[in-house]
Image (tube, rainbow, N blue to C red):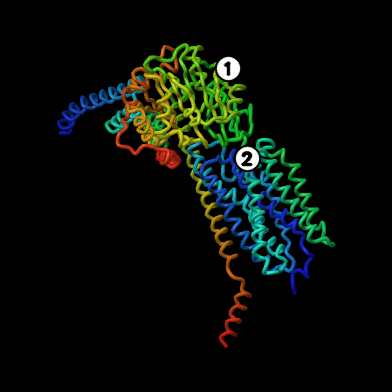
């Protein structure tokens, strides 16, 4: 019974998976050619995104996606793509040339992203200090422009006498 | 009890001197403060705004407290705040490096550091100059009271005289640093001199008003502090130490802090001309042993732009570089189009030209109009030129607005020969041509032709090109006969998708009376930062 069900399924699934494999290889070849021919990054990005969507488990389109995003200075997305690519690689691939290069690029993208984040952090610190300085200055001006307490008292006394 | 009887009669000459010194010191500090901050925080509109605003705020607070204390004090002593303000003014260059380091990291790229630099100039200038200016602000009310000598009928004349003398002093403090002191002595010693003047005036006032036993009580420590500051001043760095680079040249020019740095990159030695805060931004570049290109930097695209002329420049053709800095564009034009070109450059800062001649191979034959603004030059120049390249920047990232308007581009069109081309370098890292597109429309309107707009690969720059009598054909970018980097870039730029032709459209176009260059540039950099972190 099992054989009757599984065999046709297997017979049907094999060519489909082989075809899928072939498509993935073809898509990767197209990506490789696009990069090699130096077509505009926006087009490479569209091709890479399409390949990643169609063949989610394949590392190569993810690597190209990461590279293109890195080139377009979308560092956050590039880091994400590189990480997914490394996760999709088998042990051999990860230790091989593609894996080494991807790790190197990931480290570079992370470093650049961290430097941008550090810039934002410094900016936030500077803004905070700037507001503090402005508040201090405004407070000092307000405080110094208040009439001295004794003068106010004298003023009230004088008014009181006048009223009497 | 009347004031005139309780205190020694003030010497009016000394009071007048104090008013002059106070005005001169506060204004010299304000003018020089931006120059002191420039190598760390740049000279952006924000930096100027923060320094001026801070000075005004601190003066207001000082006037208020000074007025209050002057009313209360039995014997007004205006010499003391002058003395203290003078010492703080002289010491400000010593305090800047540790303060700046709290808000800056010189290893950051420009787009990362830009926001921090703009914002940090406020707290840093407040901590650095605020107390000194506040103390100087306290002085005039004391002087008015001392001058009036307790007679209310003389307060009007006293305040008029003191404020007039203070303003005259401020006038001197405005002109002297710009025209004489900073060019001759540099920023640090100008501030030291301003501080010294205040200490002198404060000291004389103390001695003159209190000729009795209190003489020297505050003077001796004041002079000691001033002397100590002068002793330490030469060892204080004028700018942050450059990131992984050697300094070959550095000089304060009338406009900015100029440096030539040498770095190892991709196995070669490169020299960069950097201005003010520098960071990873540069204004001229030379690769030692590299001819005809700059290793893929934006100058290579500008070098390809003459190919868009009906007849690319050759022997005898005149080419003009506006904002030539250390002469990178002129050198590349000579190396790629032959030594017979009539090379001319316009550079407002003579120190950049000097650095270019000495360290960046600025062609000897090139005629440089140094110390002249590009707009003034184009108004007076006699064409025709075959090719004009505009690569002028101020405060690191901004194209000077008067070099980006319809009126200016019309002047350029008037200088070109038919079929000649103008190329403009536009730093716009937004990825969406936030600045480059309206600028392209303005250029197109001035030339009455479609203008080429292309992003320079792997850079934060765009190139705009307009041709007199037609629109440029991007296919000509690939006509470079030189092998290697330049030809590859040419092929890339000539591909569809890398460029677009921009029509004048309906505007708005940048004009002399409306050109939001600063806000658009700022928007482009912020957009780049936000997108990078996505």
User: Residue placed at 50% from the left, 30% from the top?
Assistant: B374
| Inter-mark Cα distance, 1 to 2 | 31 Å
Taking depth in this image into account, of B218 and B506 the one nearest to the observer is: B506
Give coordinates of residue B424: x percent, y percent. 43, 28
* Residue linked to disc 1: B364
Mark 2 or mark 1, which is nearer the start of the sequence?
Answer: 2
Horizontally, is A36 left or right of B323 in the view?
left
- Can residue B176 be seen in the rendering of this structure? yes
> Disc 2 on helix, strand or loop?
helix
Give how far across and how far down residue A90 sits, in percent.
Answer: 38, 29
Q: Residue furthest right?
A: B213
Residues indicated by labels 1 and 2 sit on the same polypeptide chain: yes
Circle 1 or circle 2, nearest the eye: 2
The quarter in which the N terminus of chain B is drawn is bottom right
* Residue B309, percent from left and from top: 38, 18
Residue under numbered circle 2: B178
Identified at 41% across, 11% down, the residue is: B481
The answer to whether any part of residue A58 appears in the image is no
**Vertical placement of residue A151 versus B162, above or below:** below
Quarter of the picture containing the C terminus of chain B is top left
């Amino acid at each position: 019974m099992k054989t009757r069900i599984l065999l046709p399924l297997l017979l049907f699934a094999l060519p489909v998976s082989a075809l899928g494999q072939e498509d993935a290889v073809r898509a990767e070849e197209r990506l490789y050619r696009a990069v090699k021919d130096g077509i505009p990054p926006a087009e490479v990005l569209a091709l890479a995104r399409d390949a990643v969507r169609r063949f989610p488990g394949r590392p190569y389109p993810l690597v190209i996606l990461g590279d293109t995003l890195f080139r377009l200075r979308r560092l956050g997305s590039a880091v994400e793509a590189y990480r997914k690519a490394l996760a999709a690689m088998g042990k051999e691939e990860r230790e091989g040339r593609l894996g080494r290069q991807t790790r190197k690029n990931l480290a570079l993208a992370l470093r650049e992203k961290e430097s941008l984040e550090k810039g934002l952090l410094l900016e936030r610190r500077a803004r905070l200090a700037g507001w503090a300085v402005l508040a201090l200055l405004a407070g000092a001006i307000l405080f110094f422009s208040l009439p001295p307490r004794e003068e106010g008292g004298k003023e009230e006394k004088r008014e009181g006498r006048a009223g009497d | 009890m009347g004031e005139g009887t309780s205190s020694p009669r003030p010497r009016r000459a000394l009071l007048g001197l104090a008013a002059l010194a106070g005005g001169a010191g506060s204004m010299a500090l304000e003018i020089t403060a931006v120059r002191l901050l420039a190598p760390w925080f740049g000279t952006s509109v924000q930096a100027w705004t923060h320094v001026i605003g801070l000075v005004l705020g601190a003066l207001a607070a000082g006037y208020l407290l000074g007025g209050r204390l002057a009313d209360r004090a039995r014997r007004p002593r205006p010499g003391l705040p002058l003395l203290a303000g003078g010492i703080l003014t002289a010491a400000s260059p010593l305090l800047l490096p540790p303060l700046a380091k709290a808000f800056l990291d010189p290893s950051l790229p420009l787009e990362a550091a830009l926001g921090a630099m703009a914002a940090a100039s406020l707290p840093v200038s407040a901590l650095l100059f605020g107390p000194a200016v506040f103390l100087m602000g306290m002085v005039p009310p004391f002087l008015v009271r001392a001058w009036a000598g307790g007679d209310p009928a003389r307060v009007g004349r006293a305040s008029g005289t003191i404020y007039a003398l203070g303003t005259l002093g401020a006038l001197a403090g405005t002109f002297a640093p710009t025209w004489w002191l900073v060019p001759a002595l540099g920023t640090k010693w100008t501030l030291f001199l301003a501080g010294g003047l205040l200490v002198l005036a404060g000291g004389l006032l103390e001695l003159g008003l209190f000729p009795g036993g209190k003489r020297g009580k505050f003077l001796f420590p004041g002079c000691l502090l001033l002397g100590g500051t002068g002793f330490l001043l030469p060892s204080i760095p004028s700018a942050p130490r450059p990131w992984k680079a050697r300094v070959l040249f550095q000089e304060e020019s009338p406009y900015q802090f100029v440096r030539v740095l040498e770095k190892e990159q991709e196995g070669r030695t490169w020299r960069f001309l950097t201005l003010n805060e520098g960071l990873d931004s540069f204004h001229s570049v030379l690769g030692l042993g590299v001819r005809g290109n700059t290793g893929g930097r934006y100058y290579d695209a500008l070098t390809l732009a003459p190919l868009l002329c009906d007849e690319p420049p050759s022997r005898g053709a005149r080419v003009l570089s506006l904002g030539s800095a250390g002469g990178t564009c002129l050198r590349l034009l000579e190396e790629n189009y032959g030594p017979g070109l009539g090379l001319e450059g316009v550079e407002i800062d003579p120190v950049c030209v000097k650095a270019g001649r000495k360290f960046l191979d600025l062609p000897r034959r090139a005629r440089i109009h140094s110390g002249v603004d590009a707009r003034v030059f184009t108004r007076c120049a006699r064409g025709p030129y075959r090719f004009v390249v505009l690569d002028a920047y101020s405060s690191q990232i901004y194209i000077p607005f008067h070099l980006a308007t319809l009126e200016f581009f019309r002047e350029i069109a008037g200088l070109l020969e038919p079929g000649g081309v103008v190329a403009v370098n536009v730093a716009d890292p937004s990825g969406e041509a936030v600045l480059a597109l309206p600028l392209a429309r303005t250029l197109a309107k001035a030339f009455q032709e479609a203008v080429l707009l292309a992003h320079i690969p792997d850079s934060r720059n765009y190139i705009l090109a307009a041709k007199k009598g037609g629109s440029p054909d991007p296919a000509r970018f690939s006509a470079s006969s030189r092998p290697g980097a330049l030809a590859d870039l040419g092929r890339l730029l000539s591909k569809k998708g890398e460029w677009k032709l921009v029509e004048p459209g309906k505007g708005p176009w940048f004009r002399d009376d409306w050109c939001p260059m600063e806000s658009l540039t700022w928007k482009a950099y912020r957009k780049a930062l936000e997108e990078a972190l996505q």
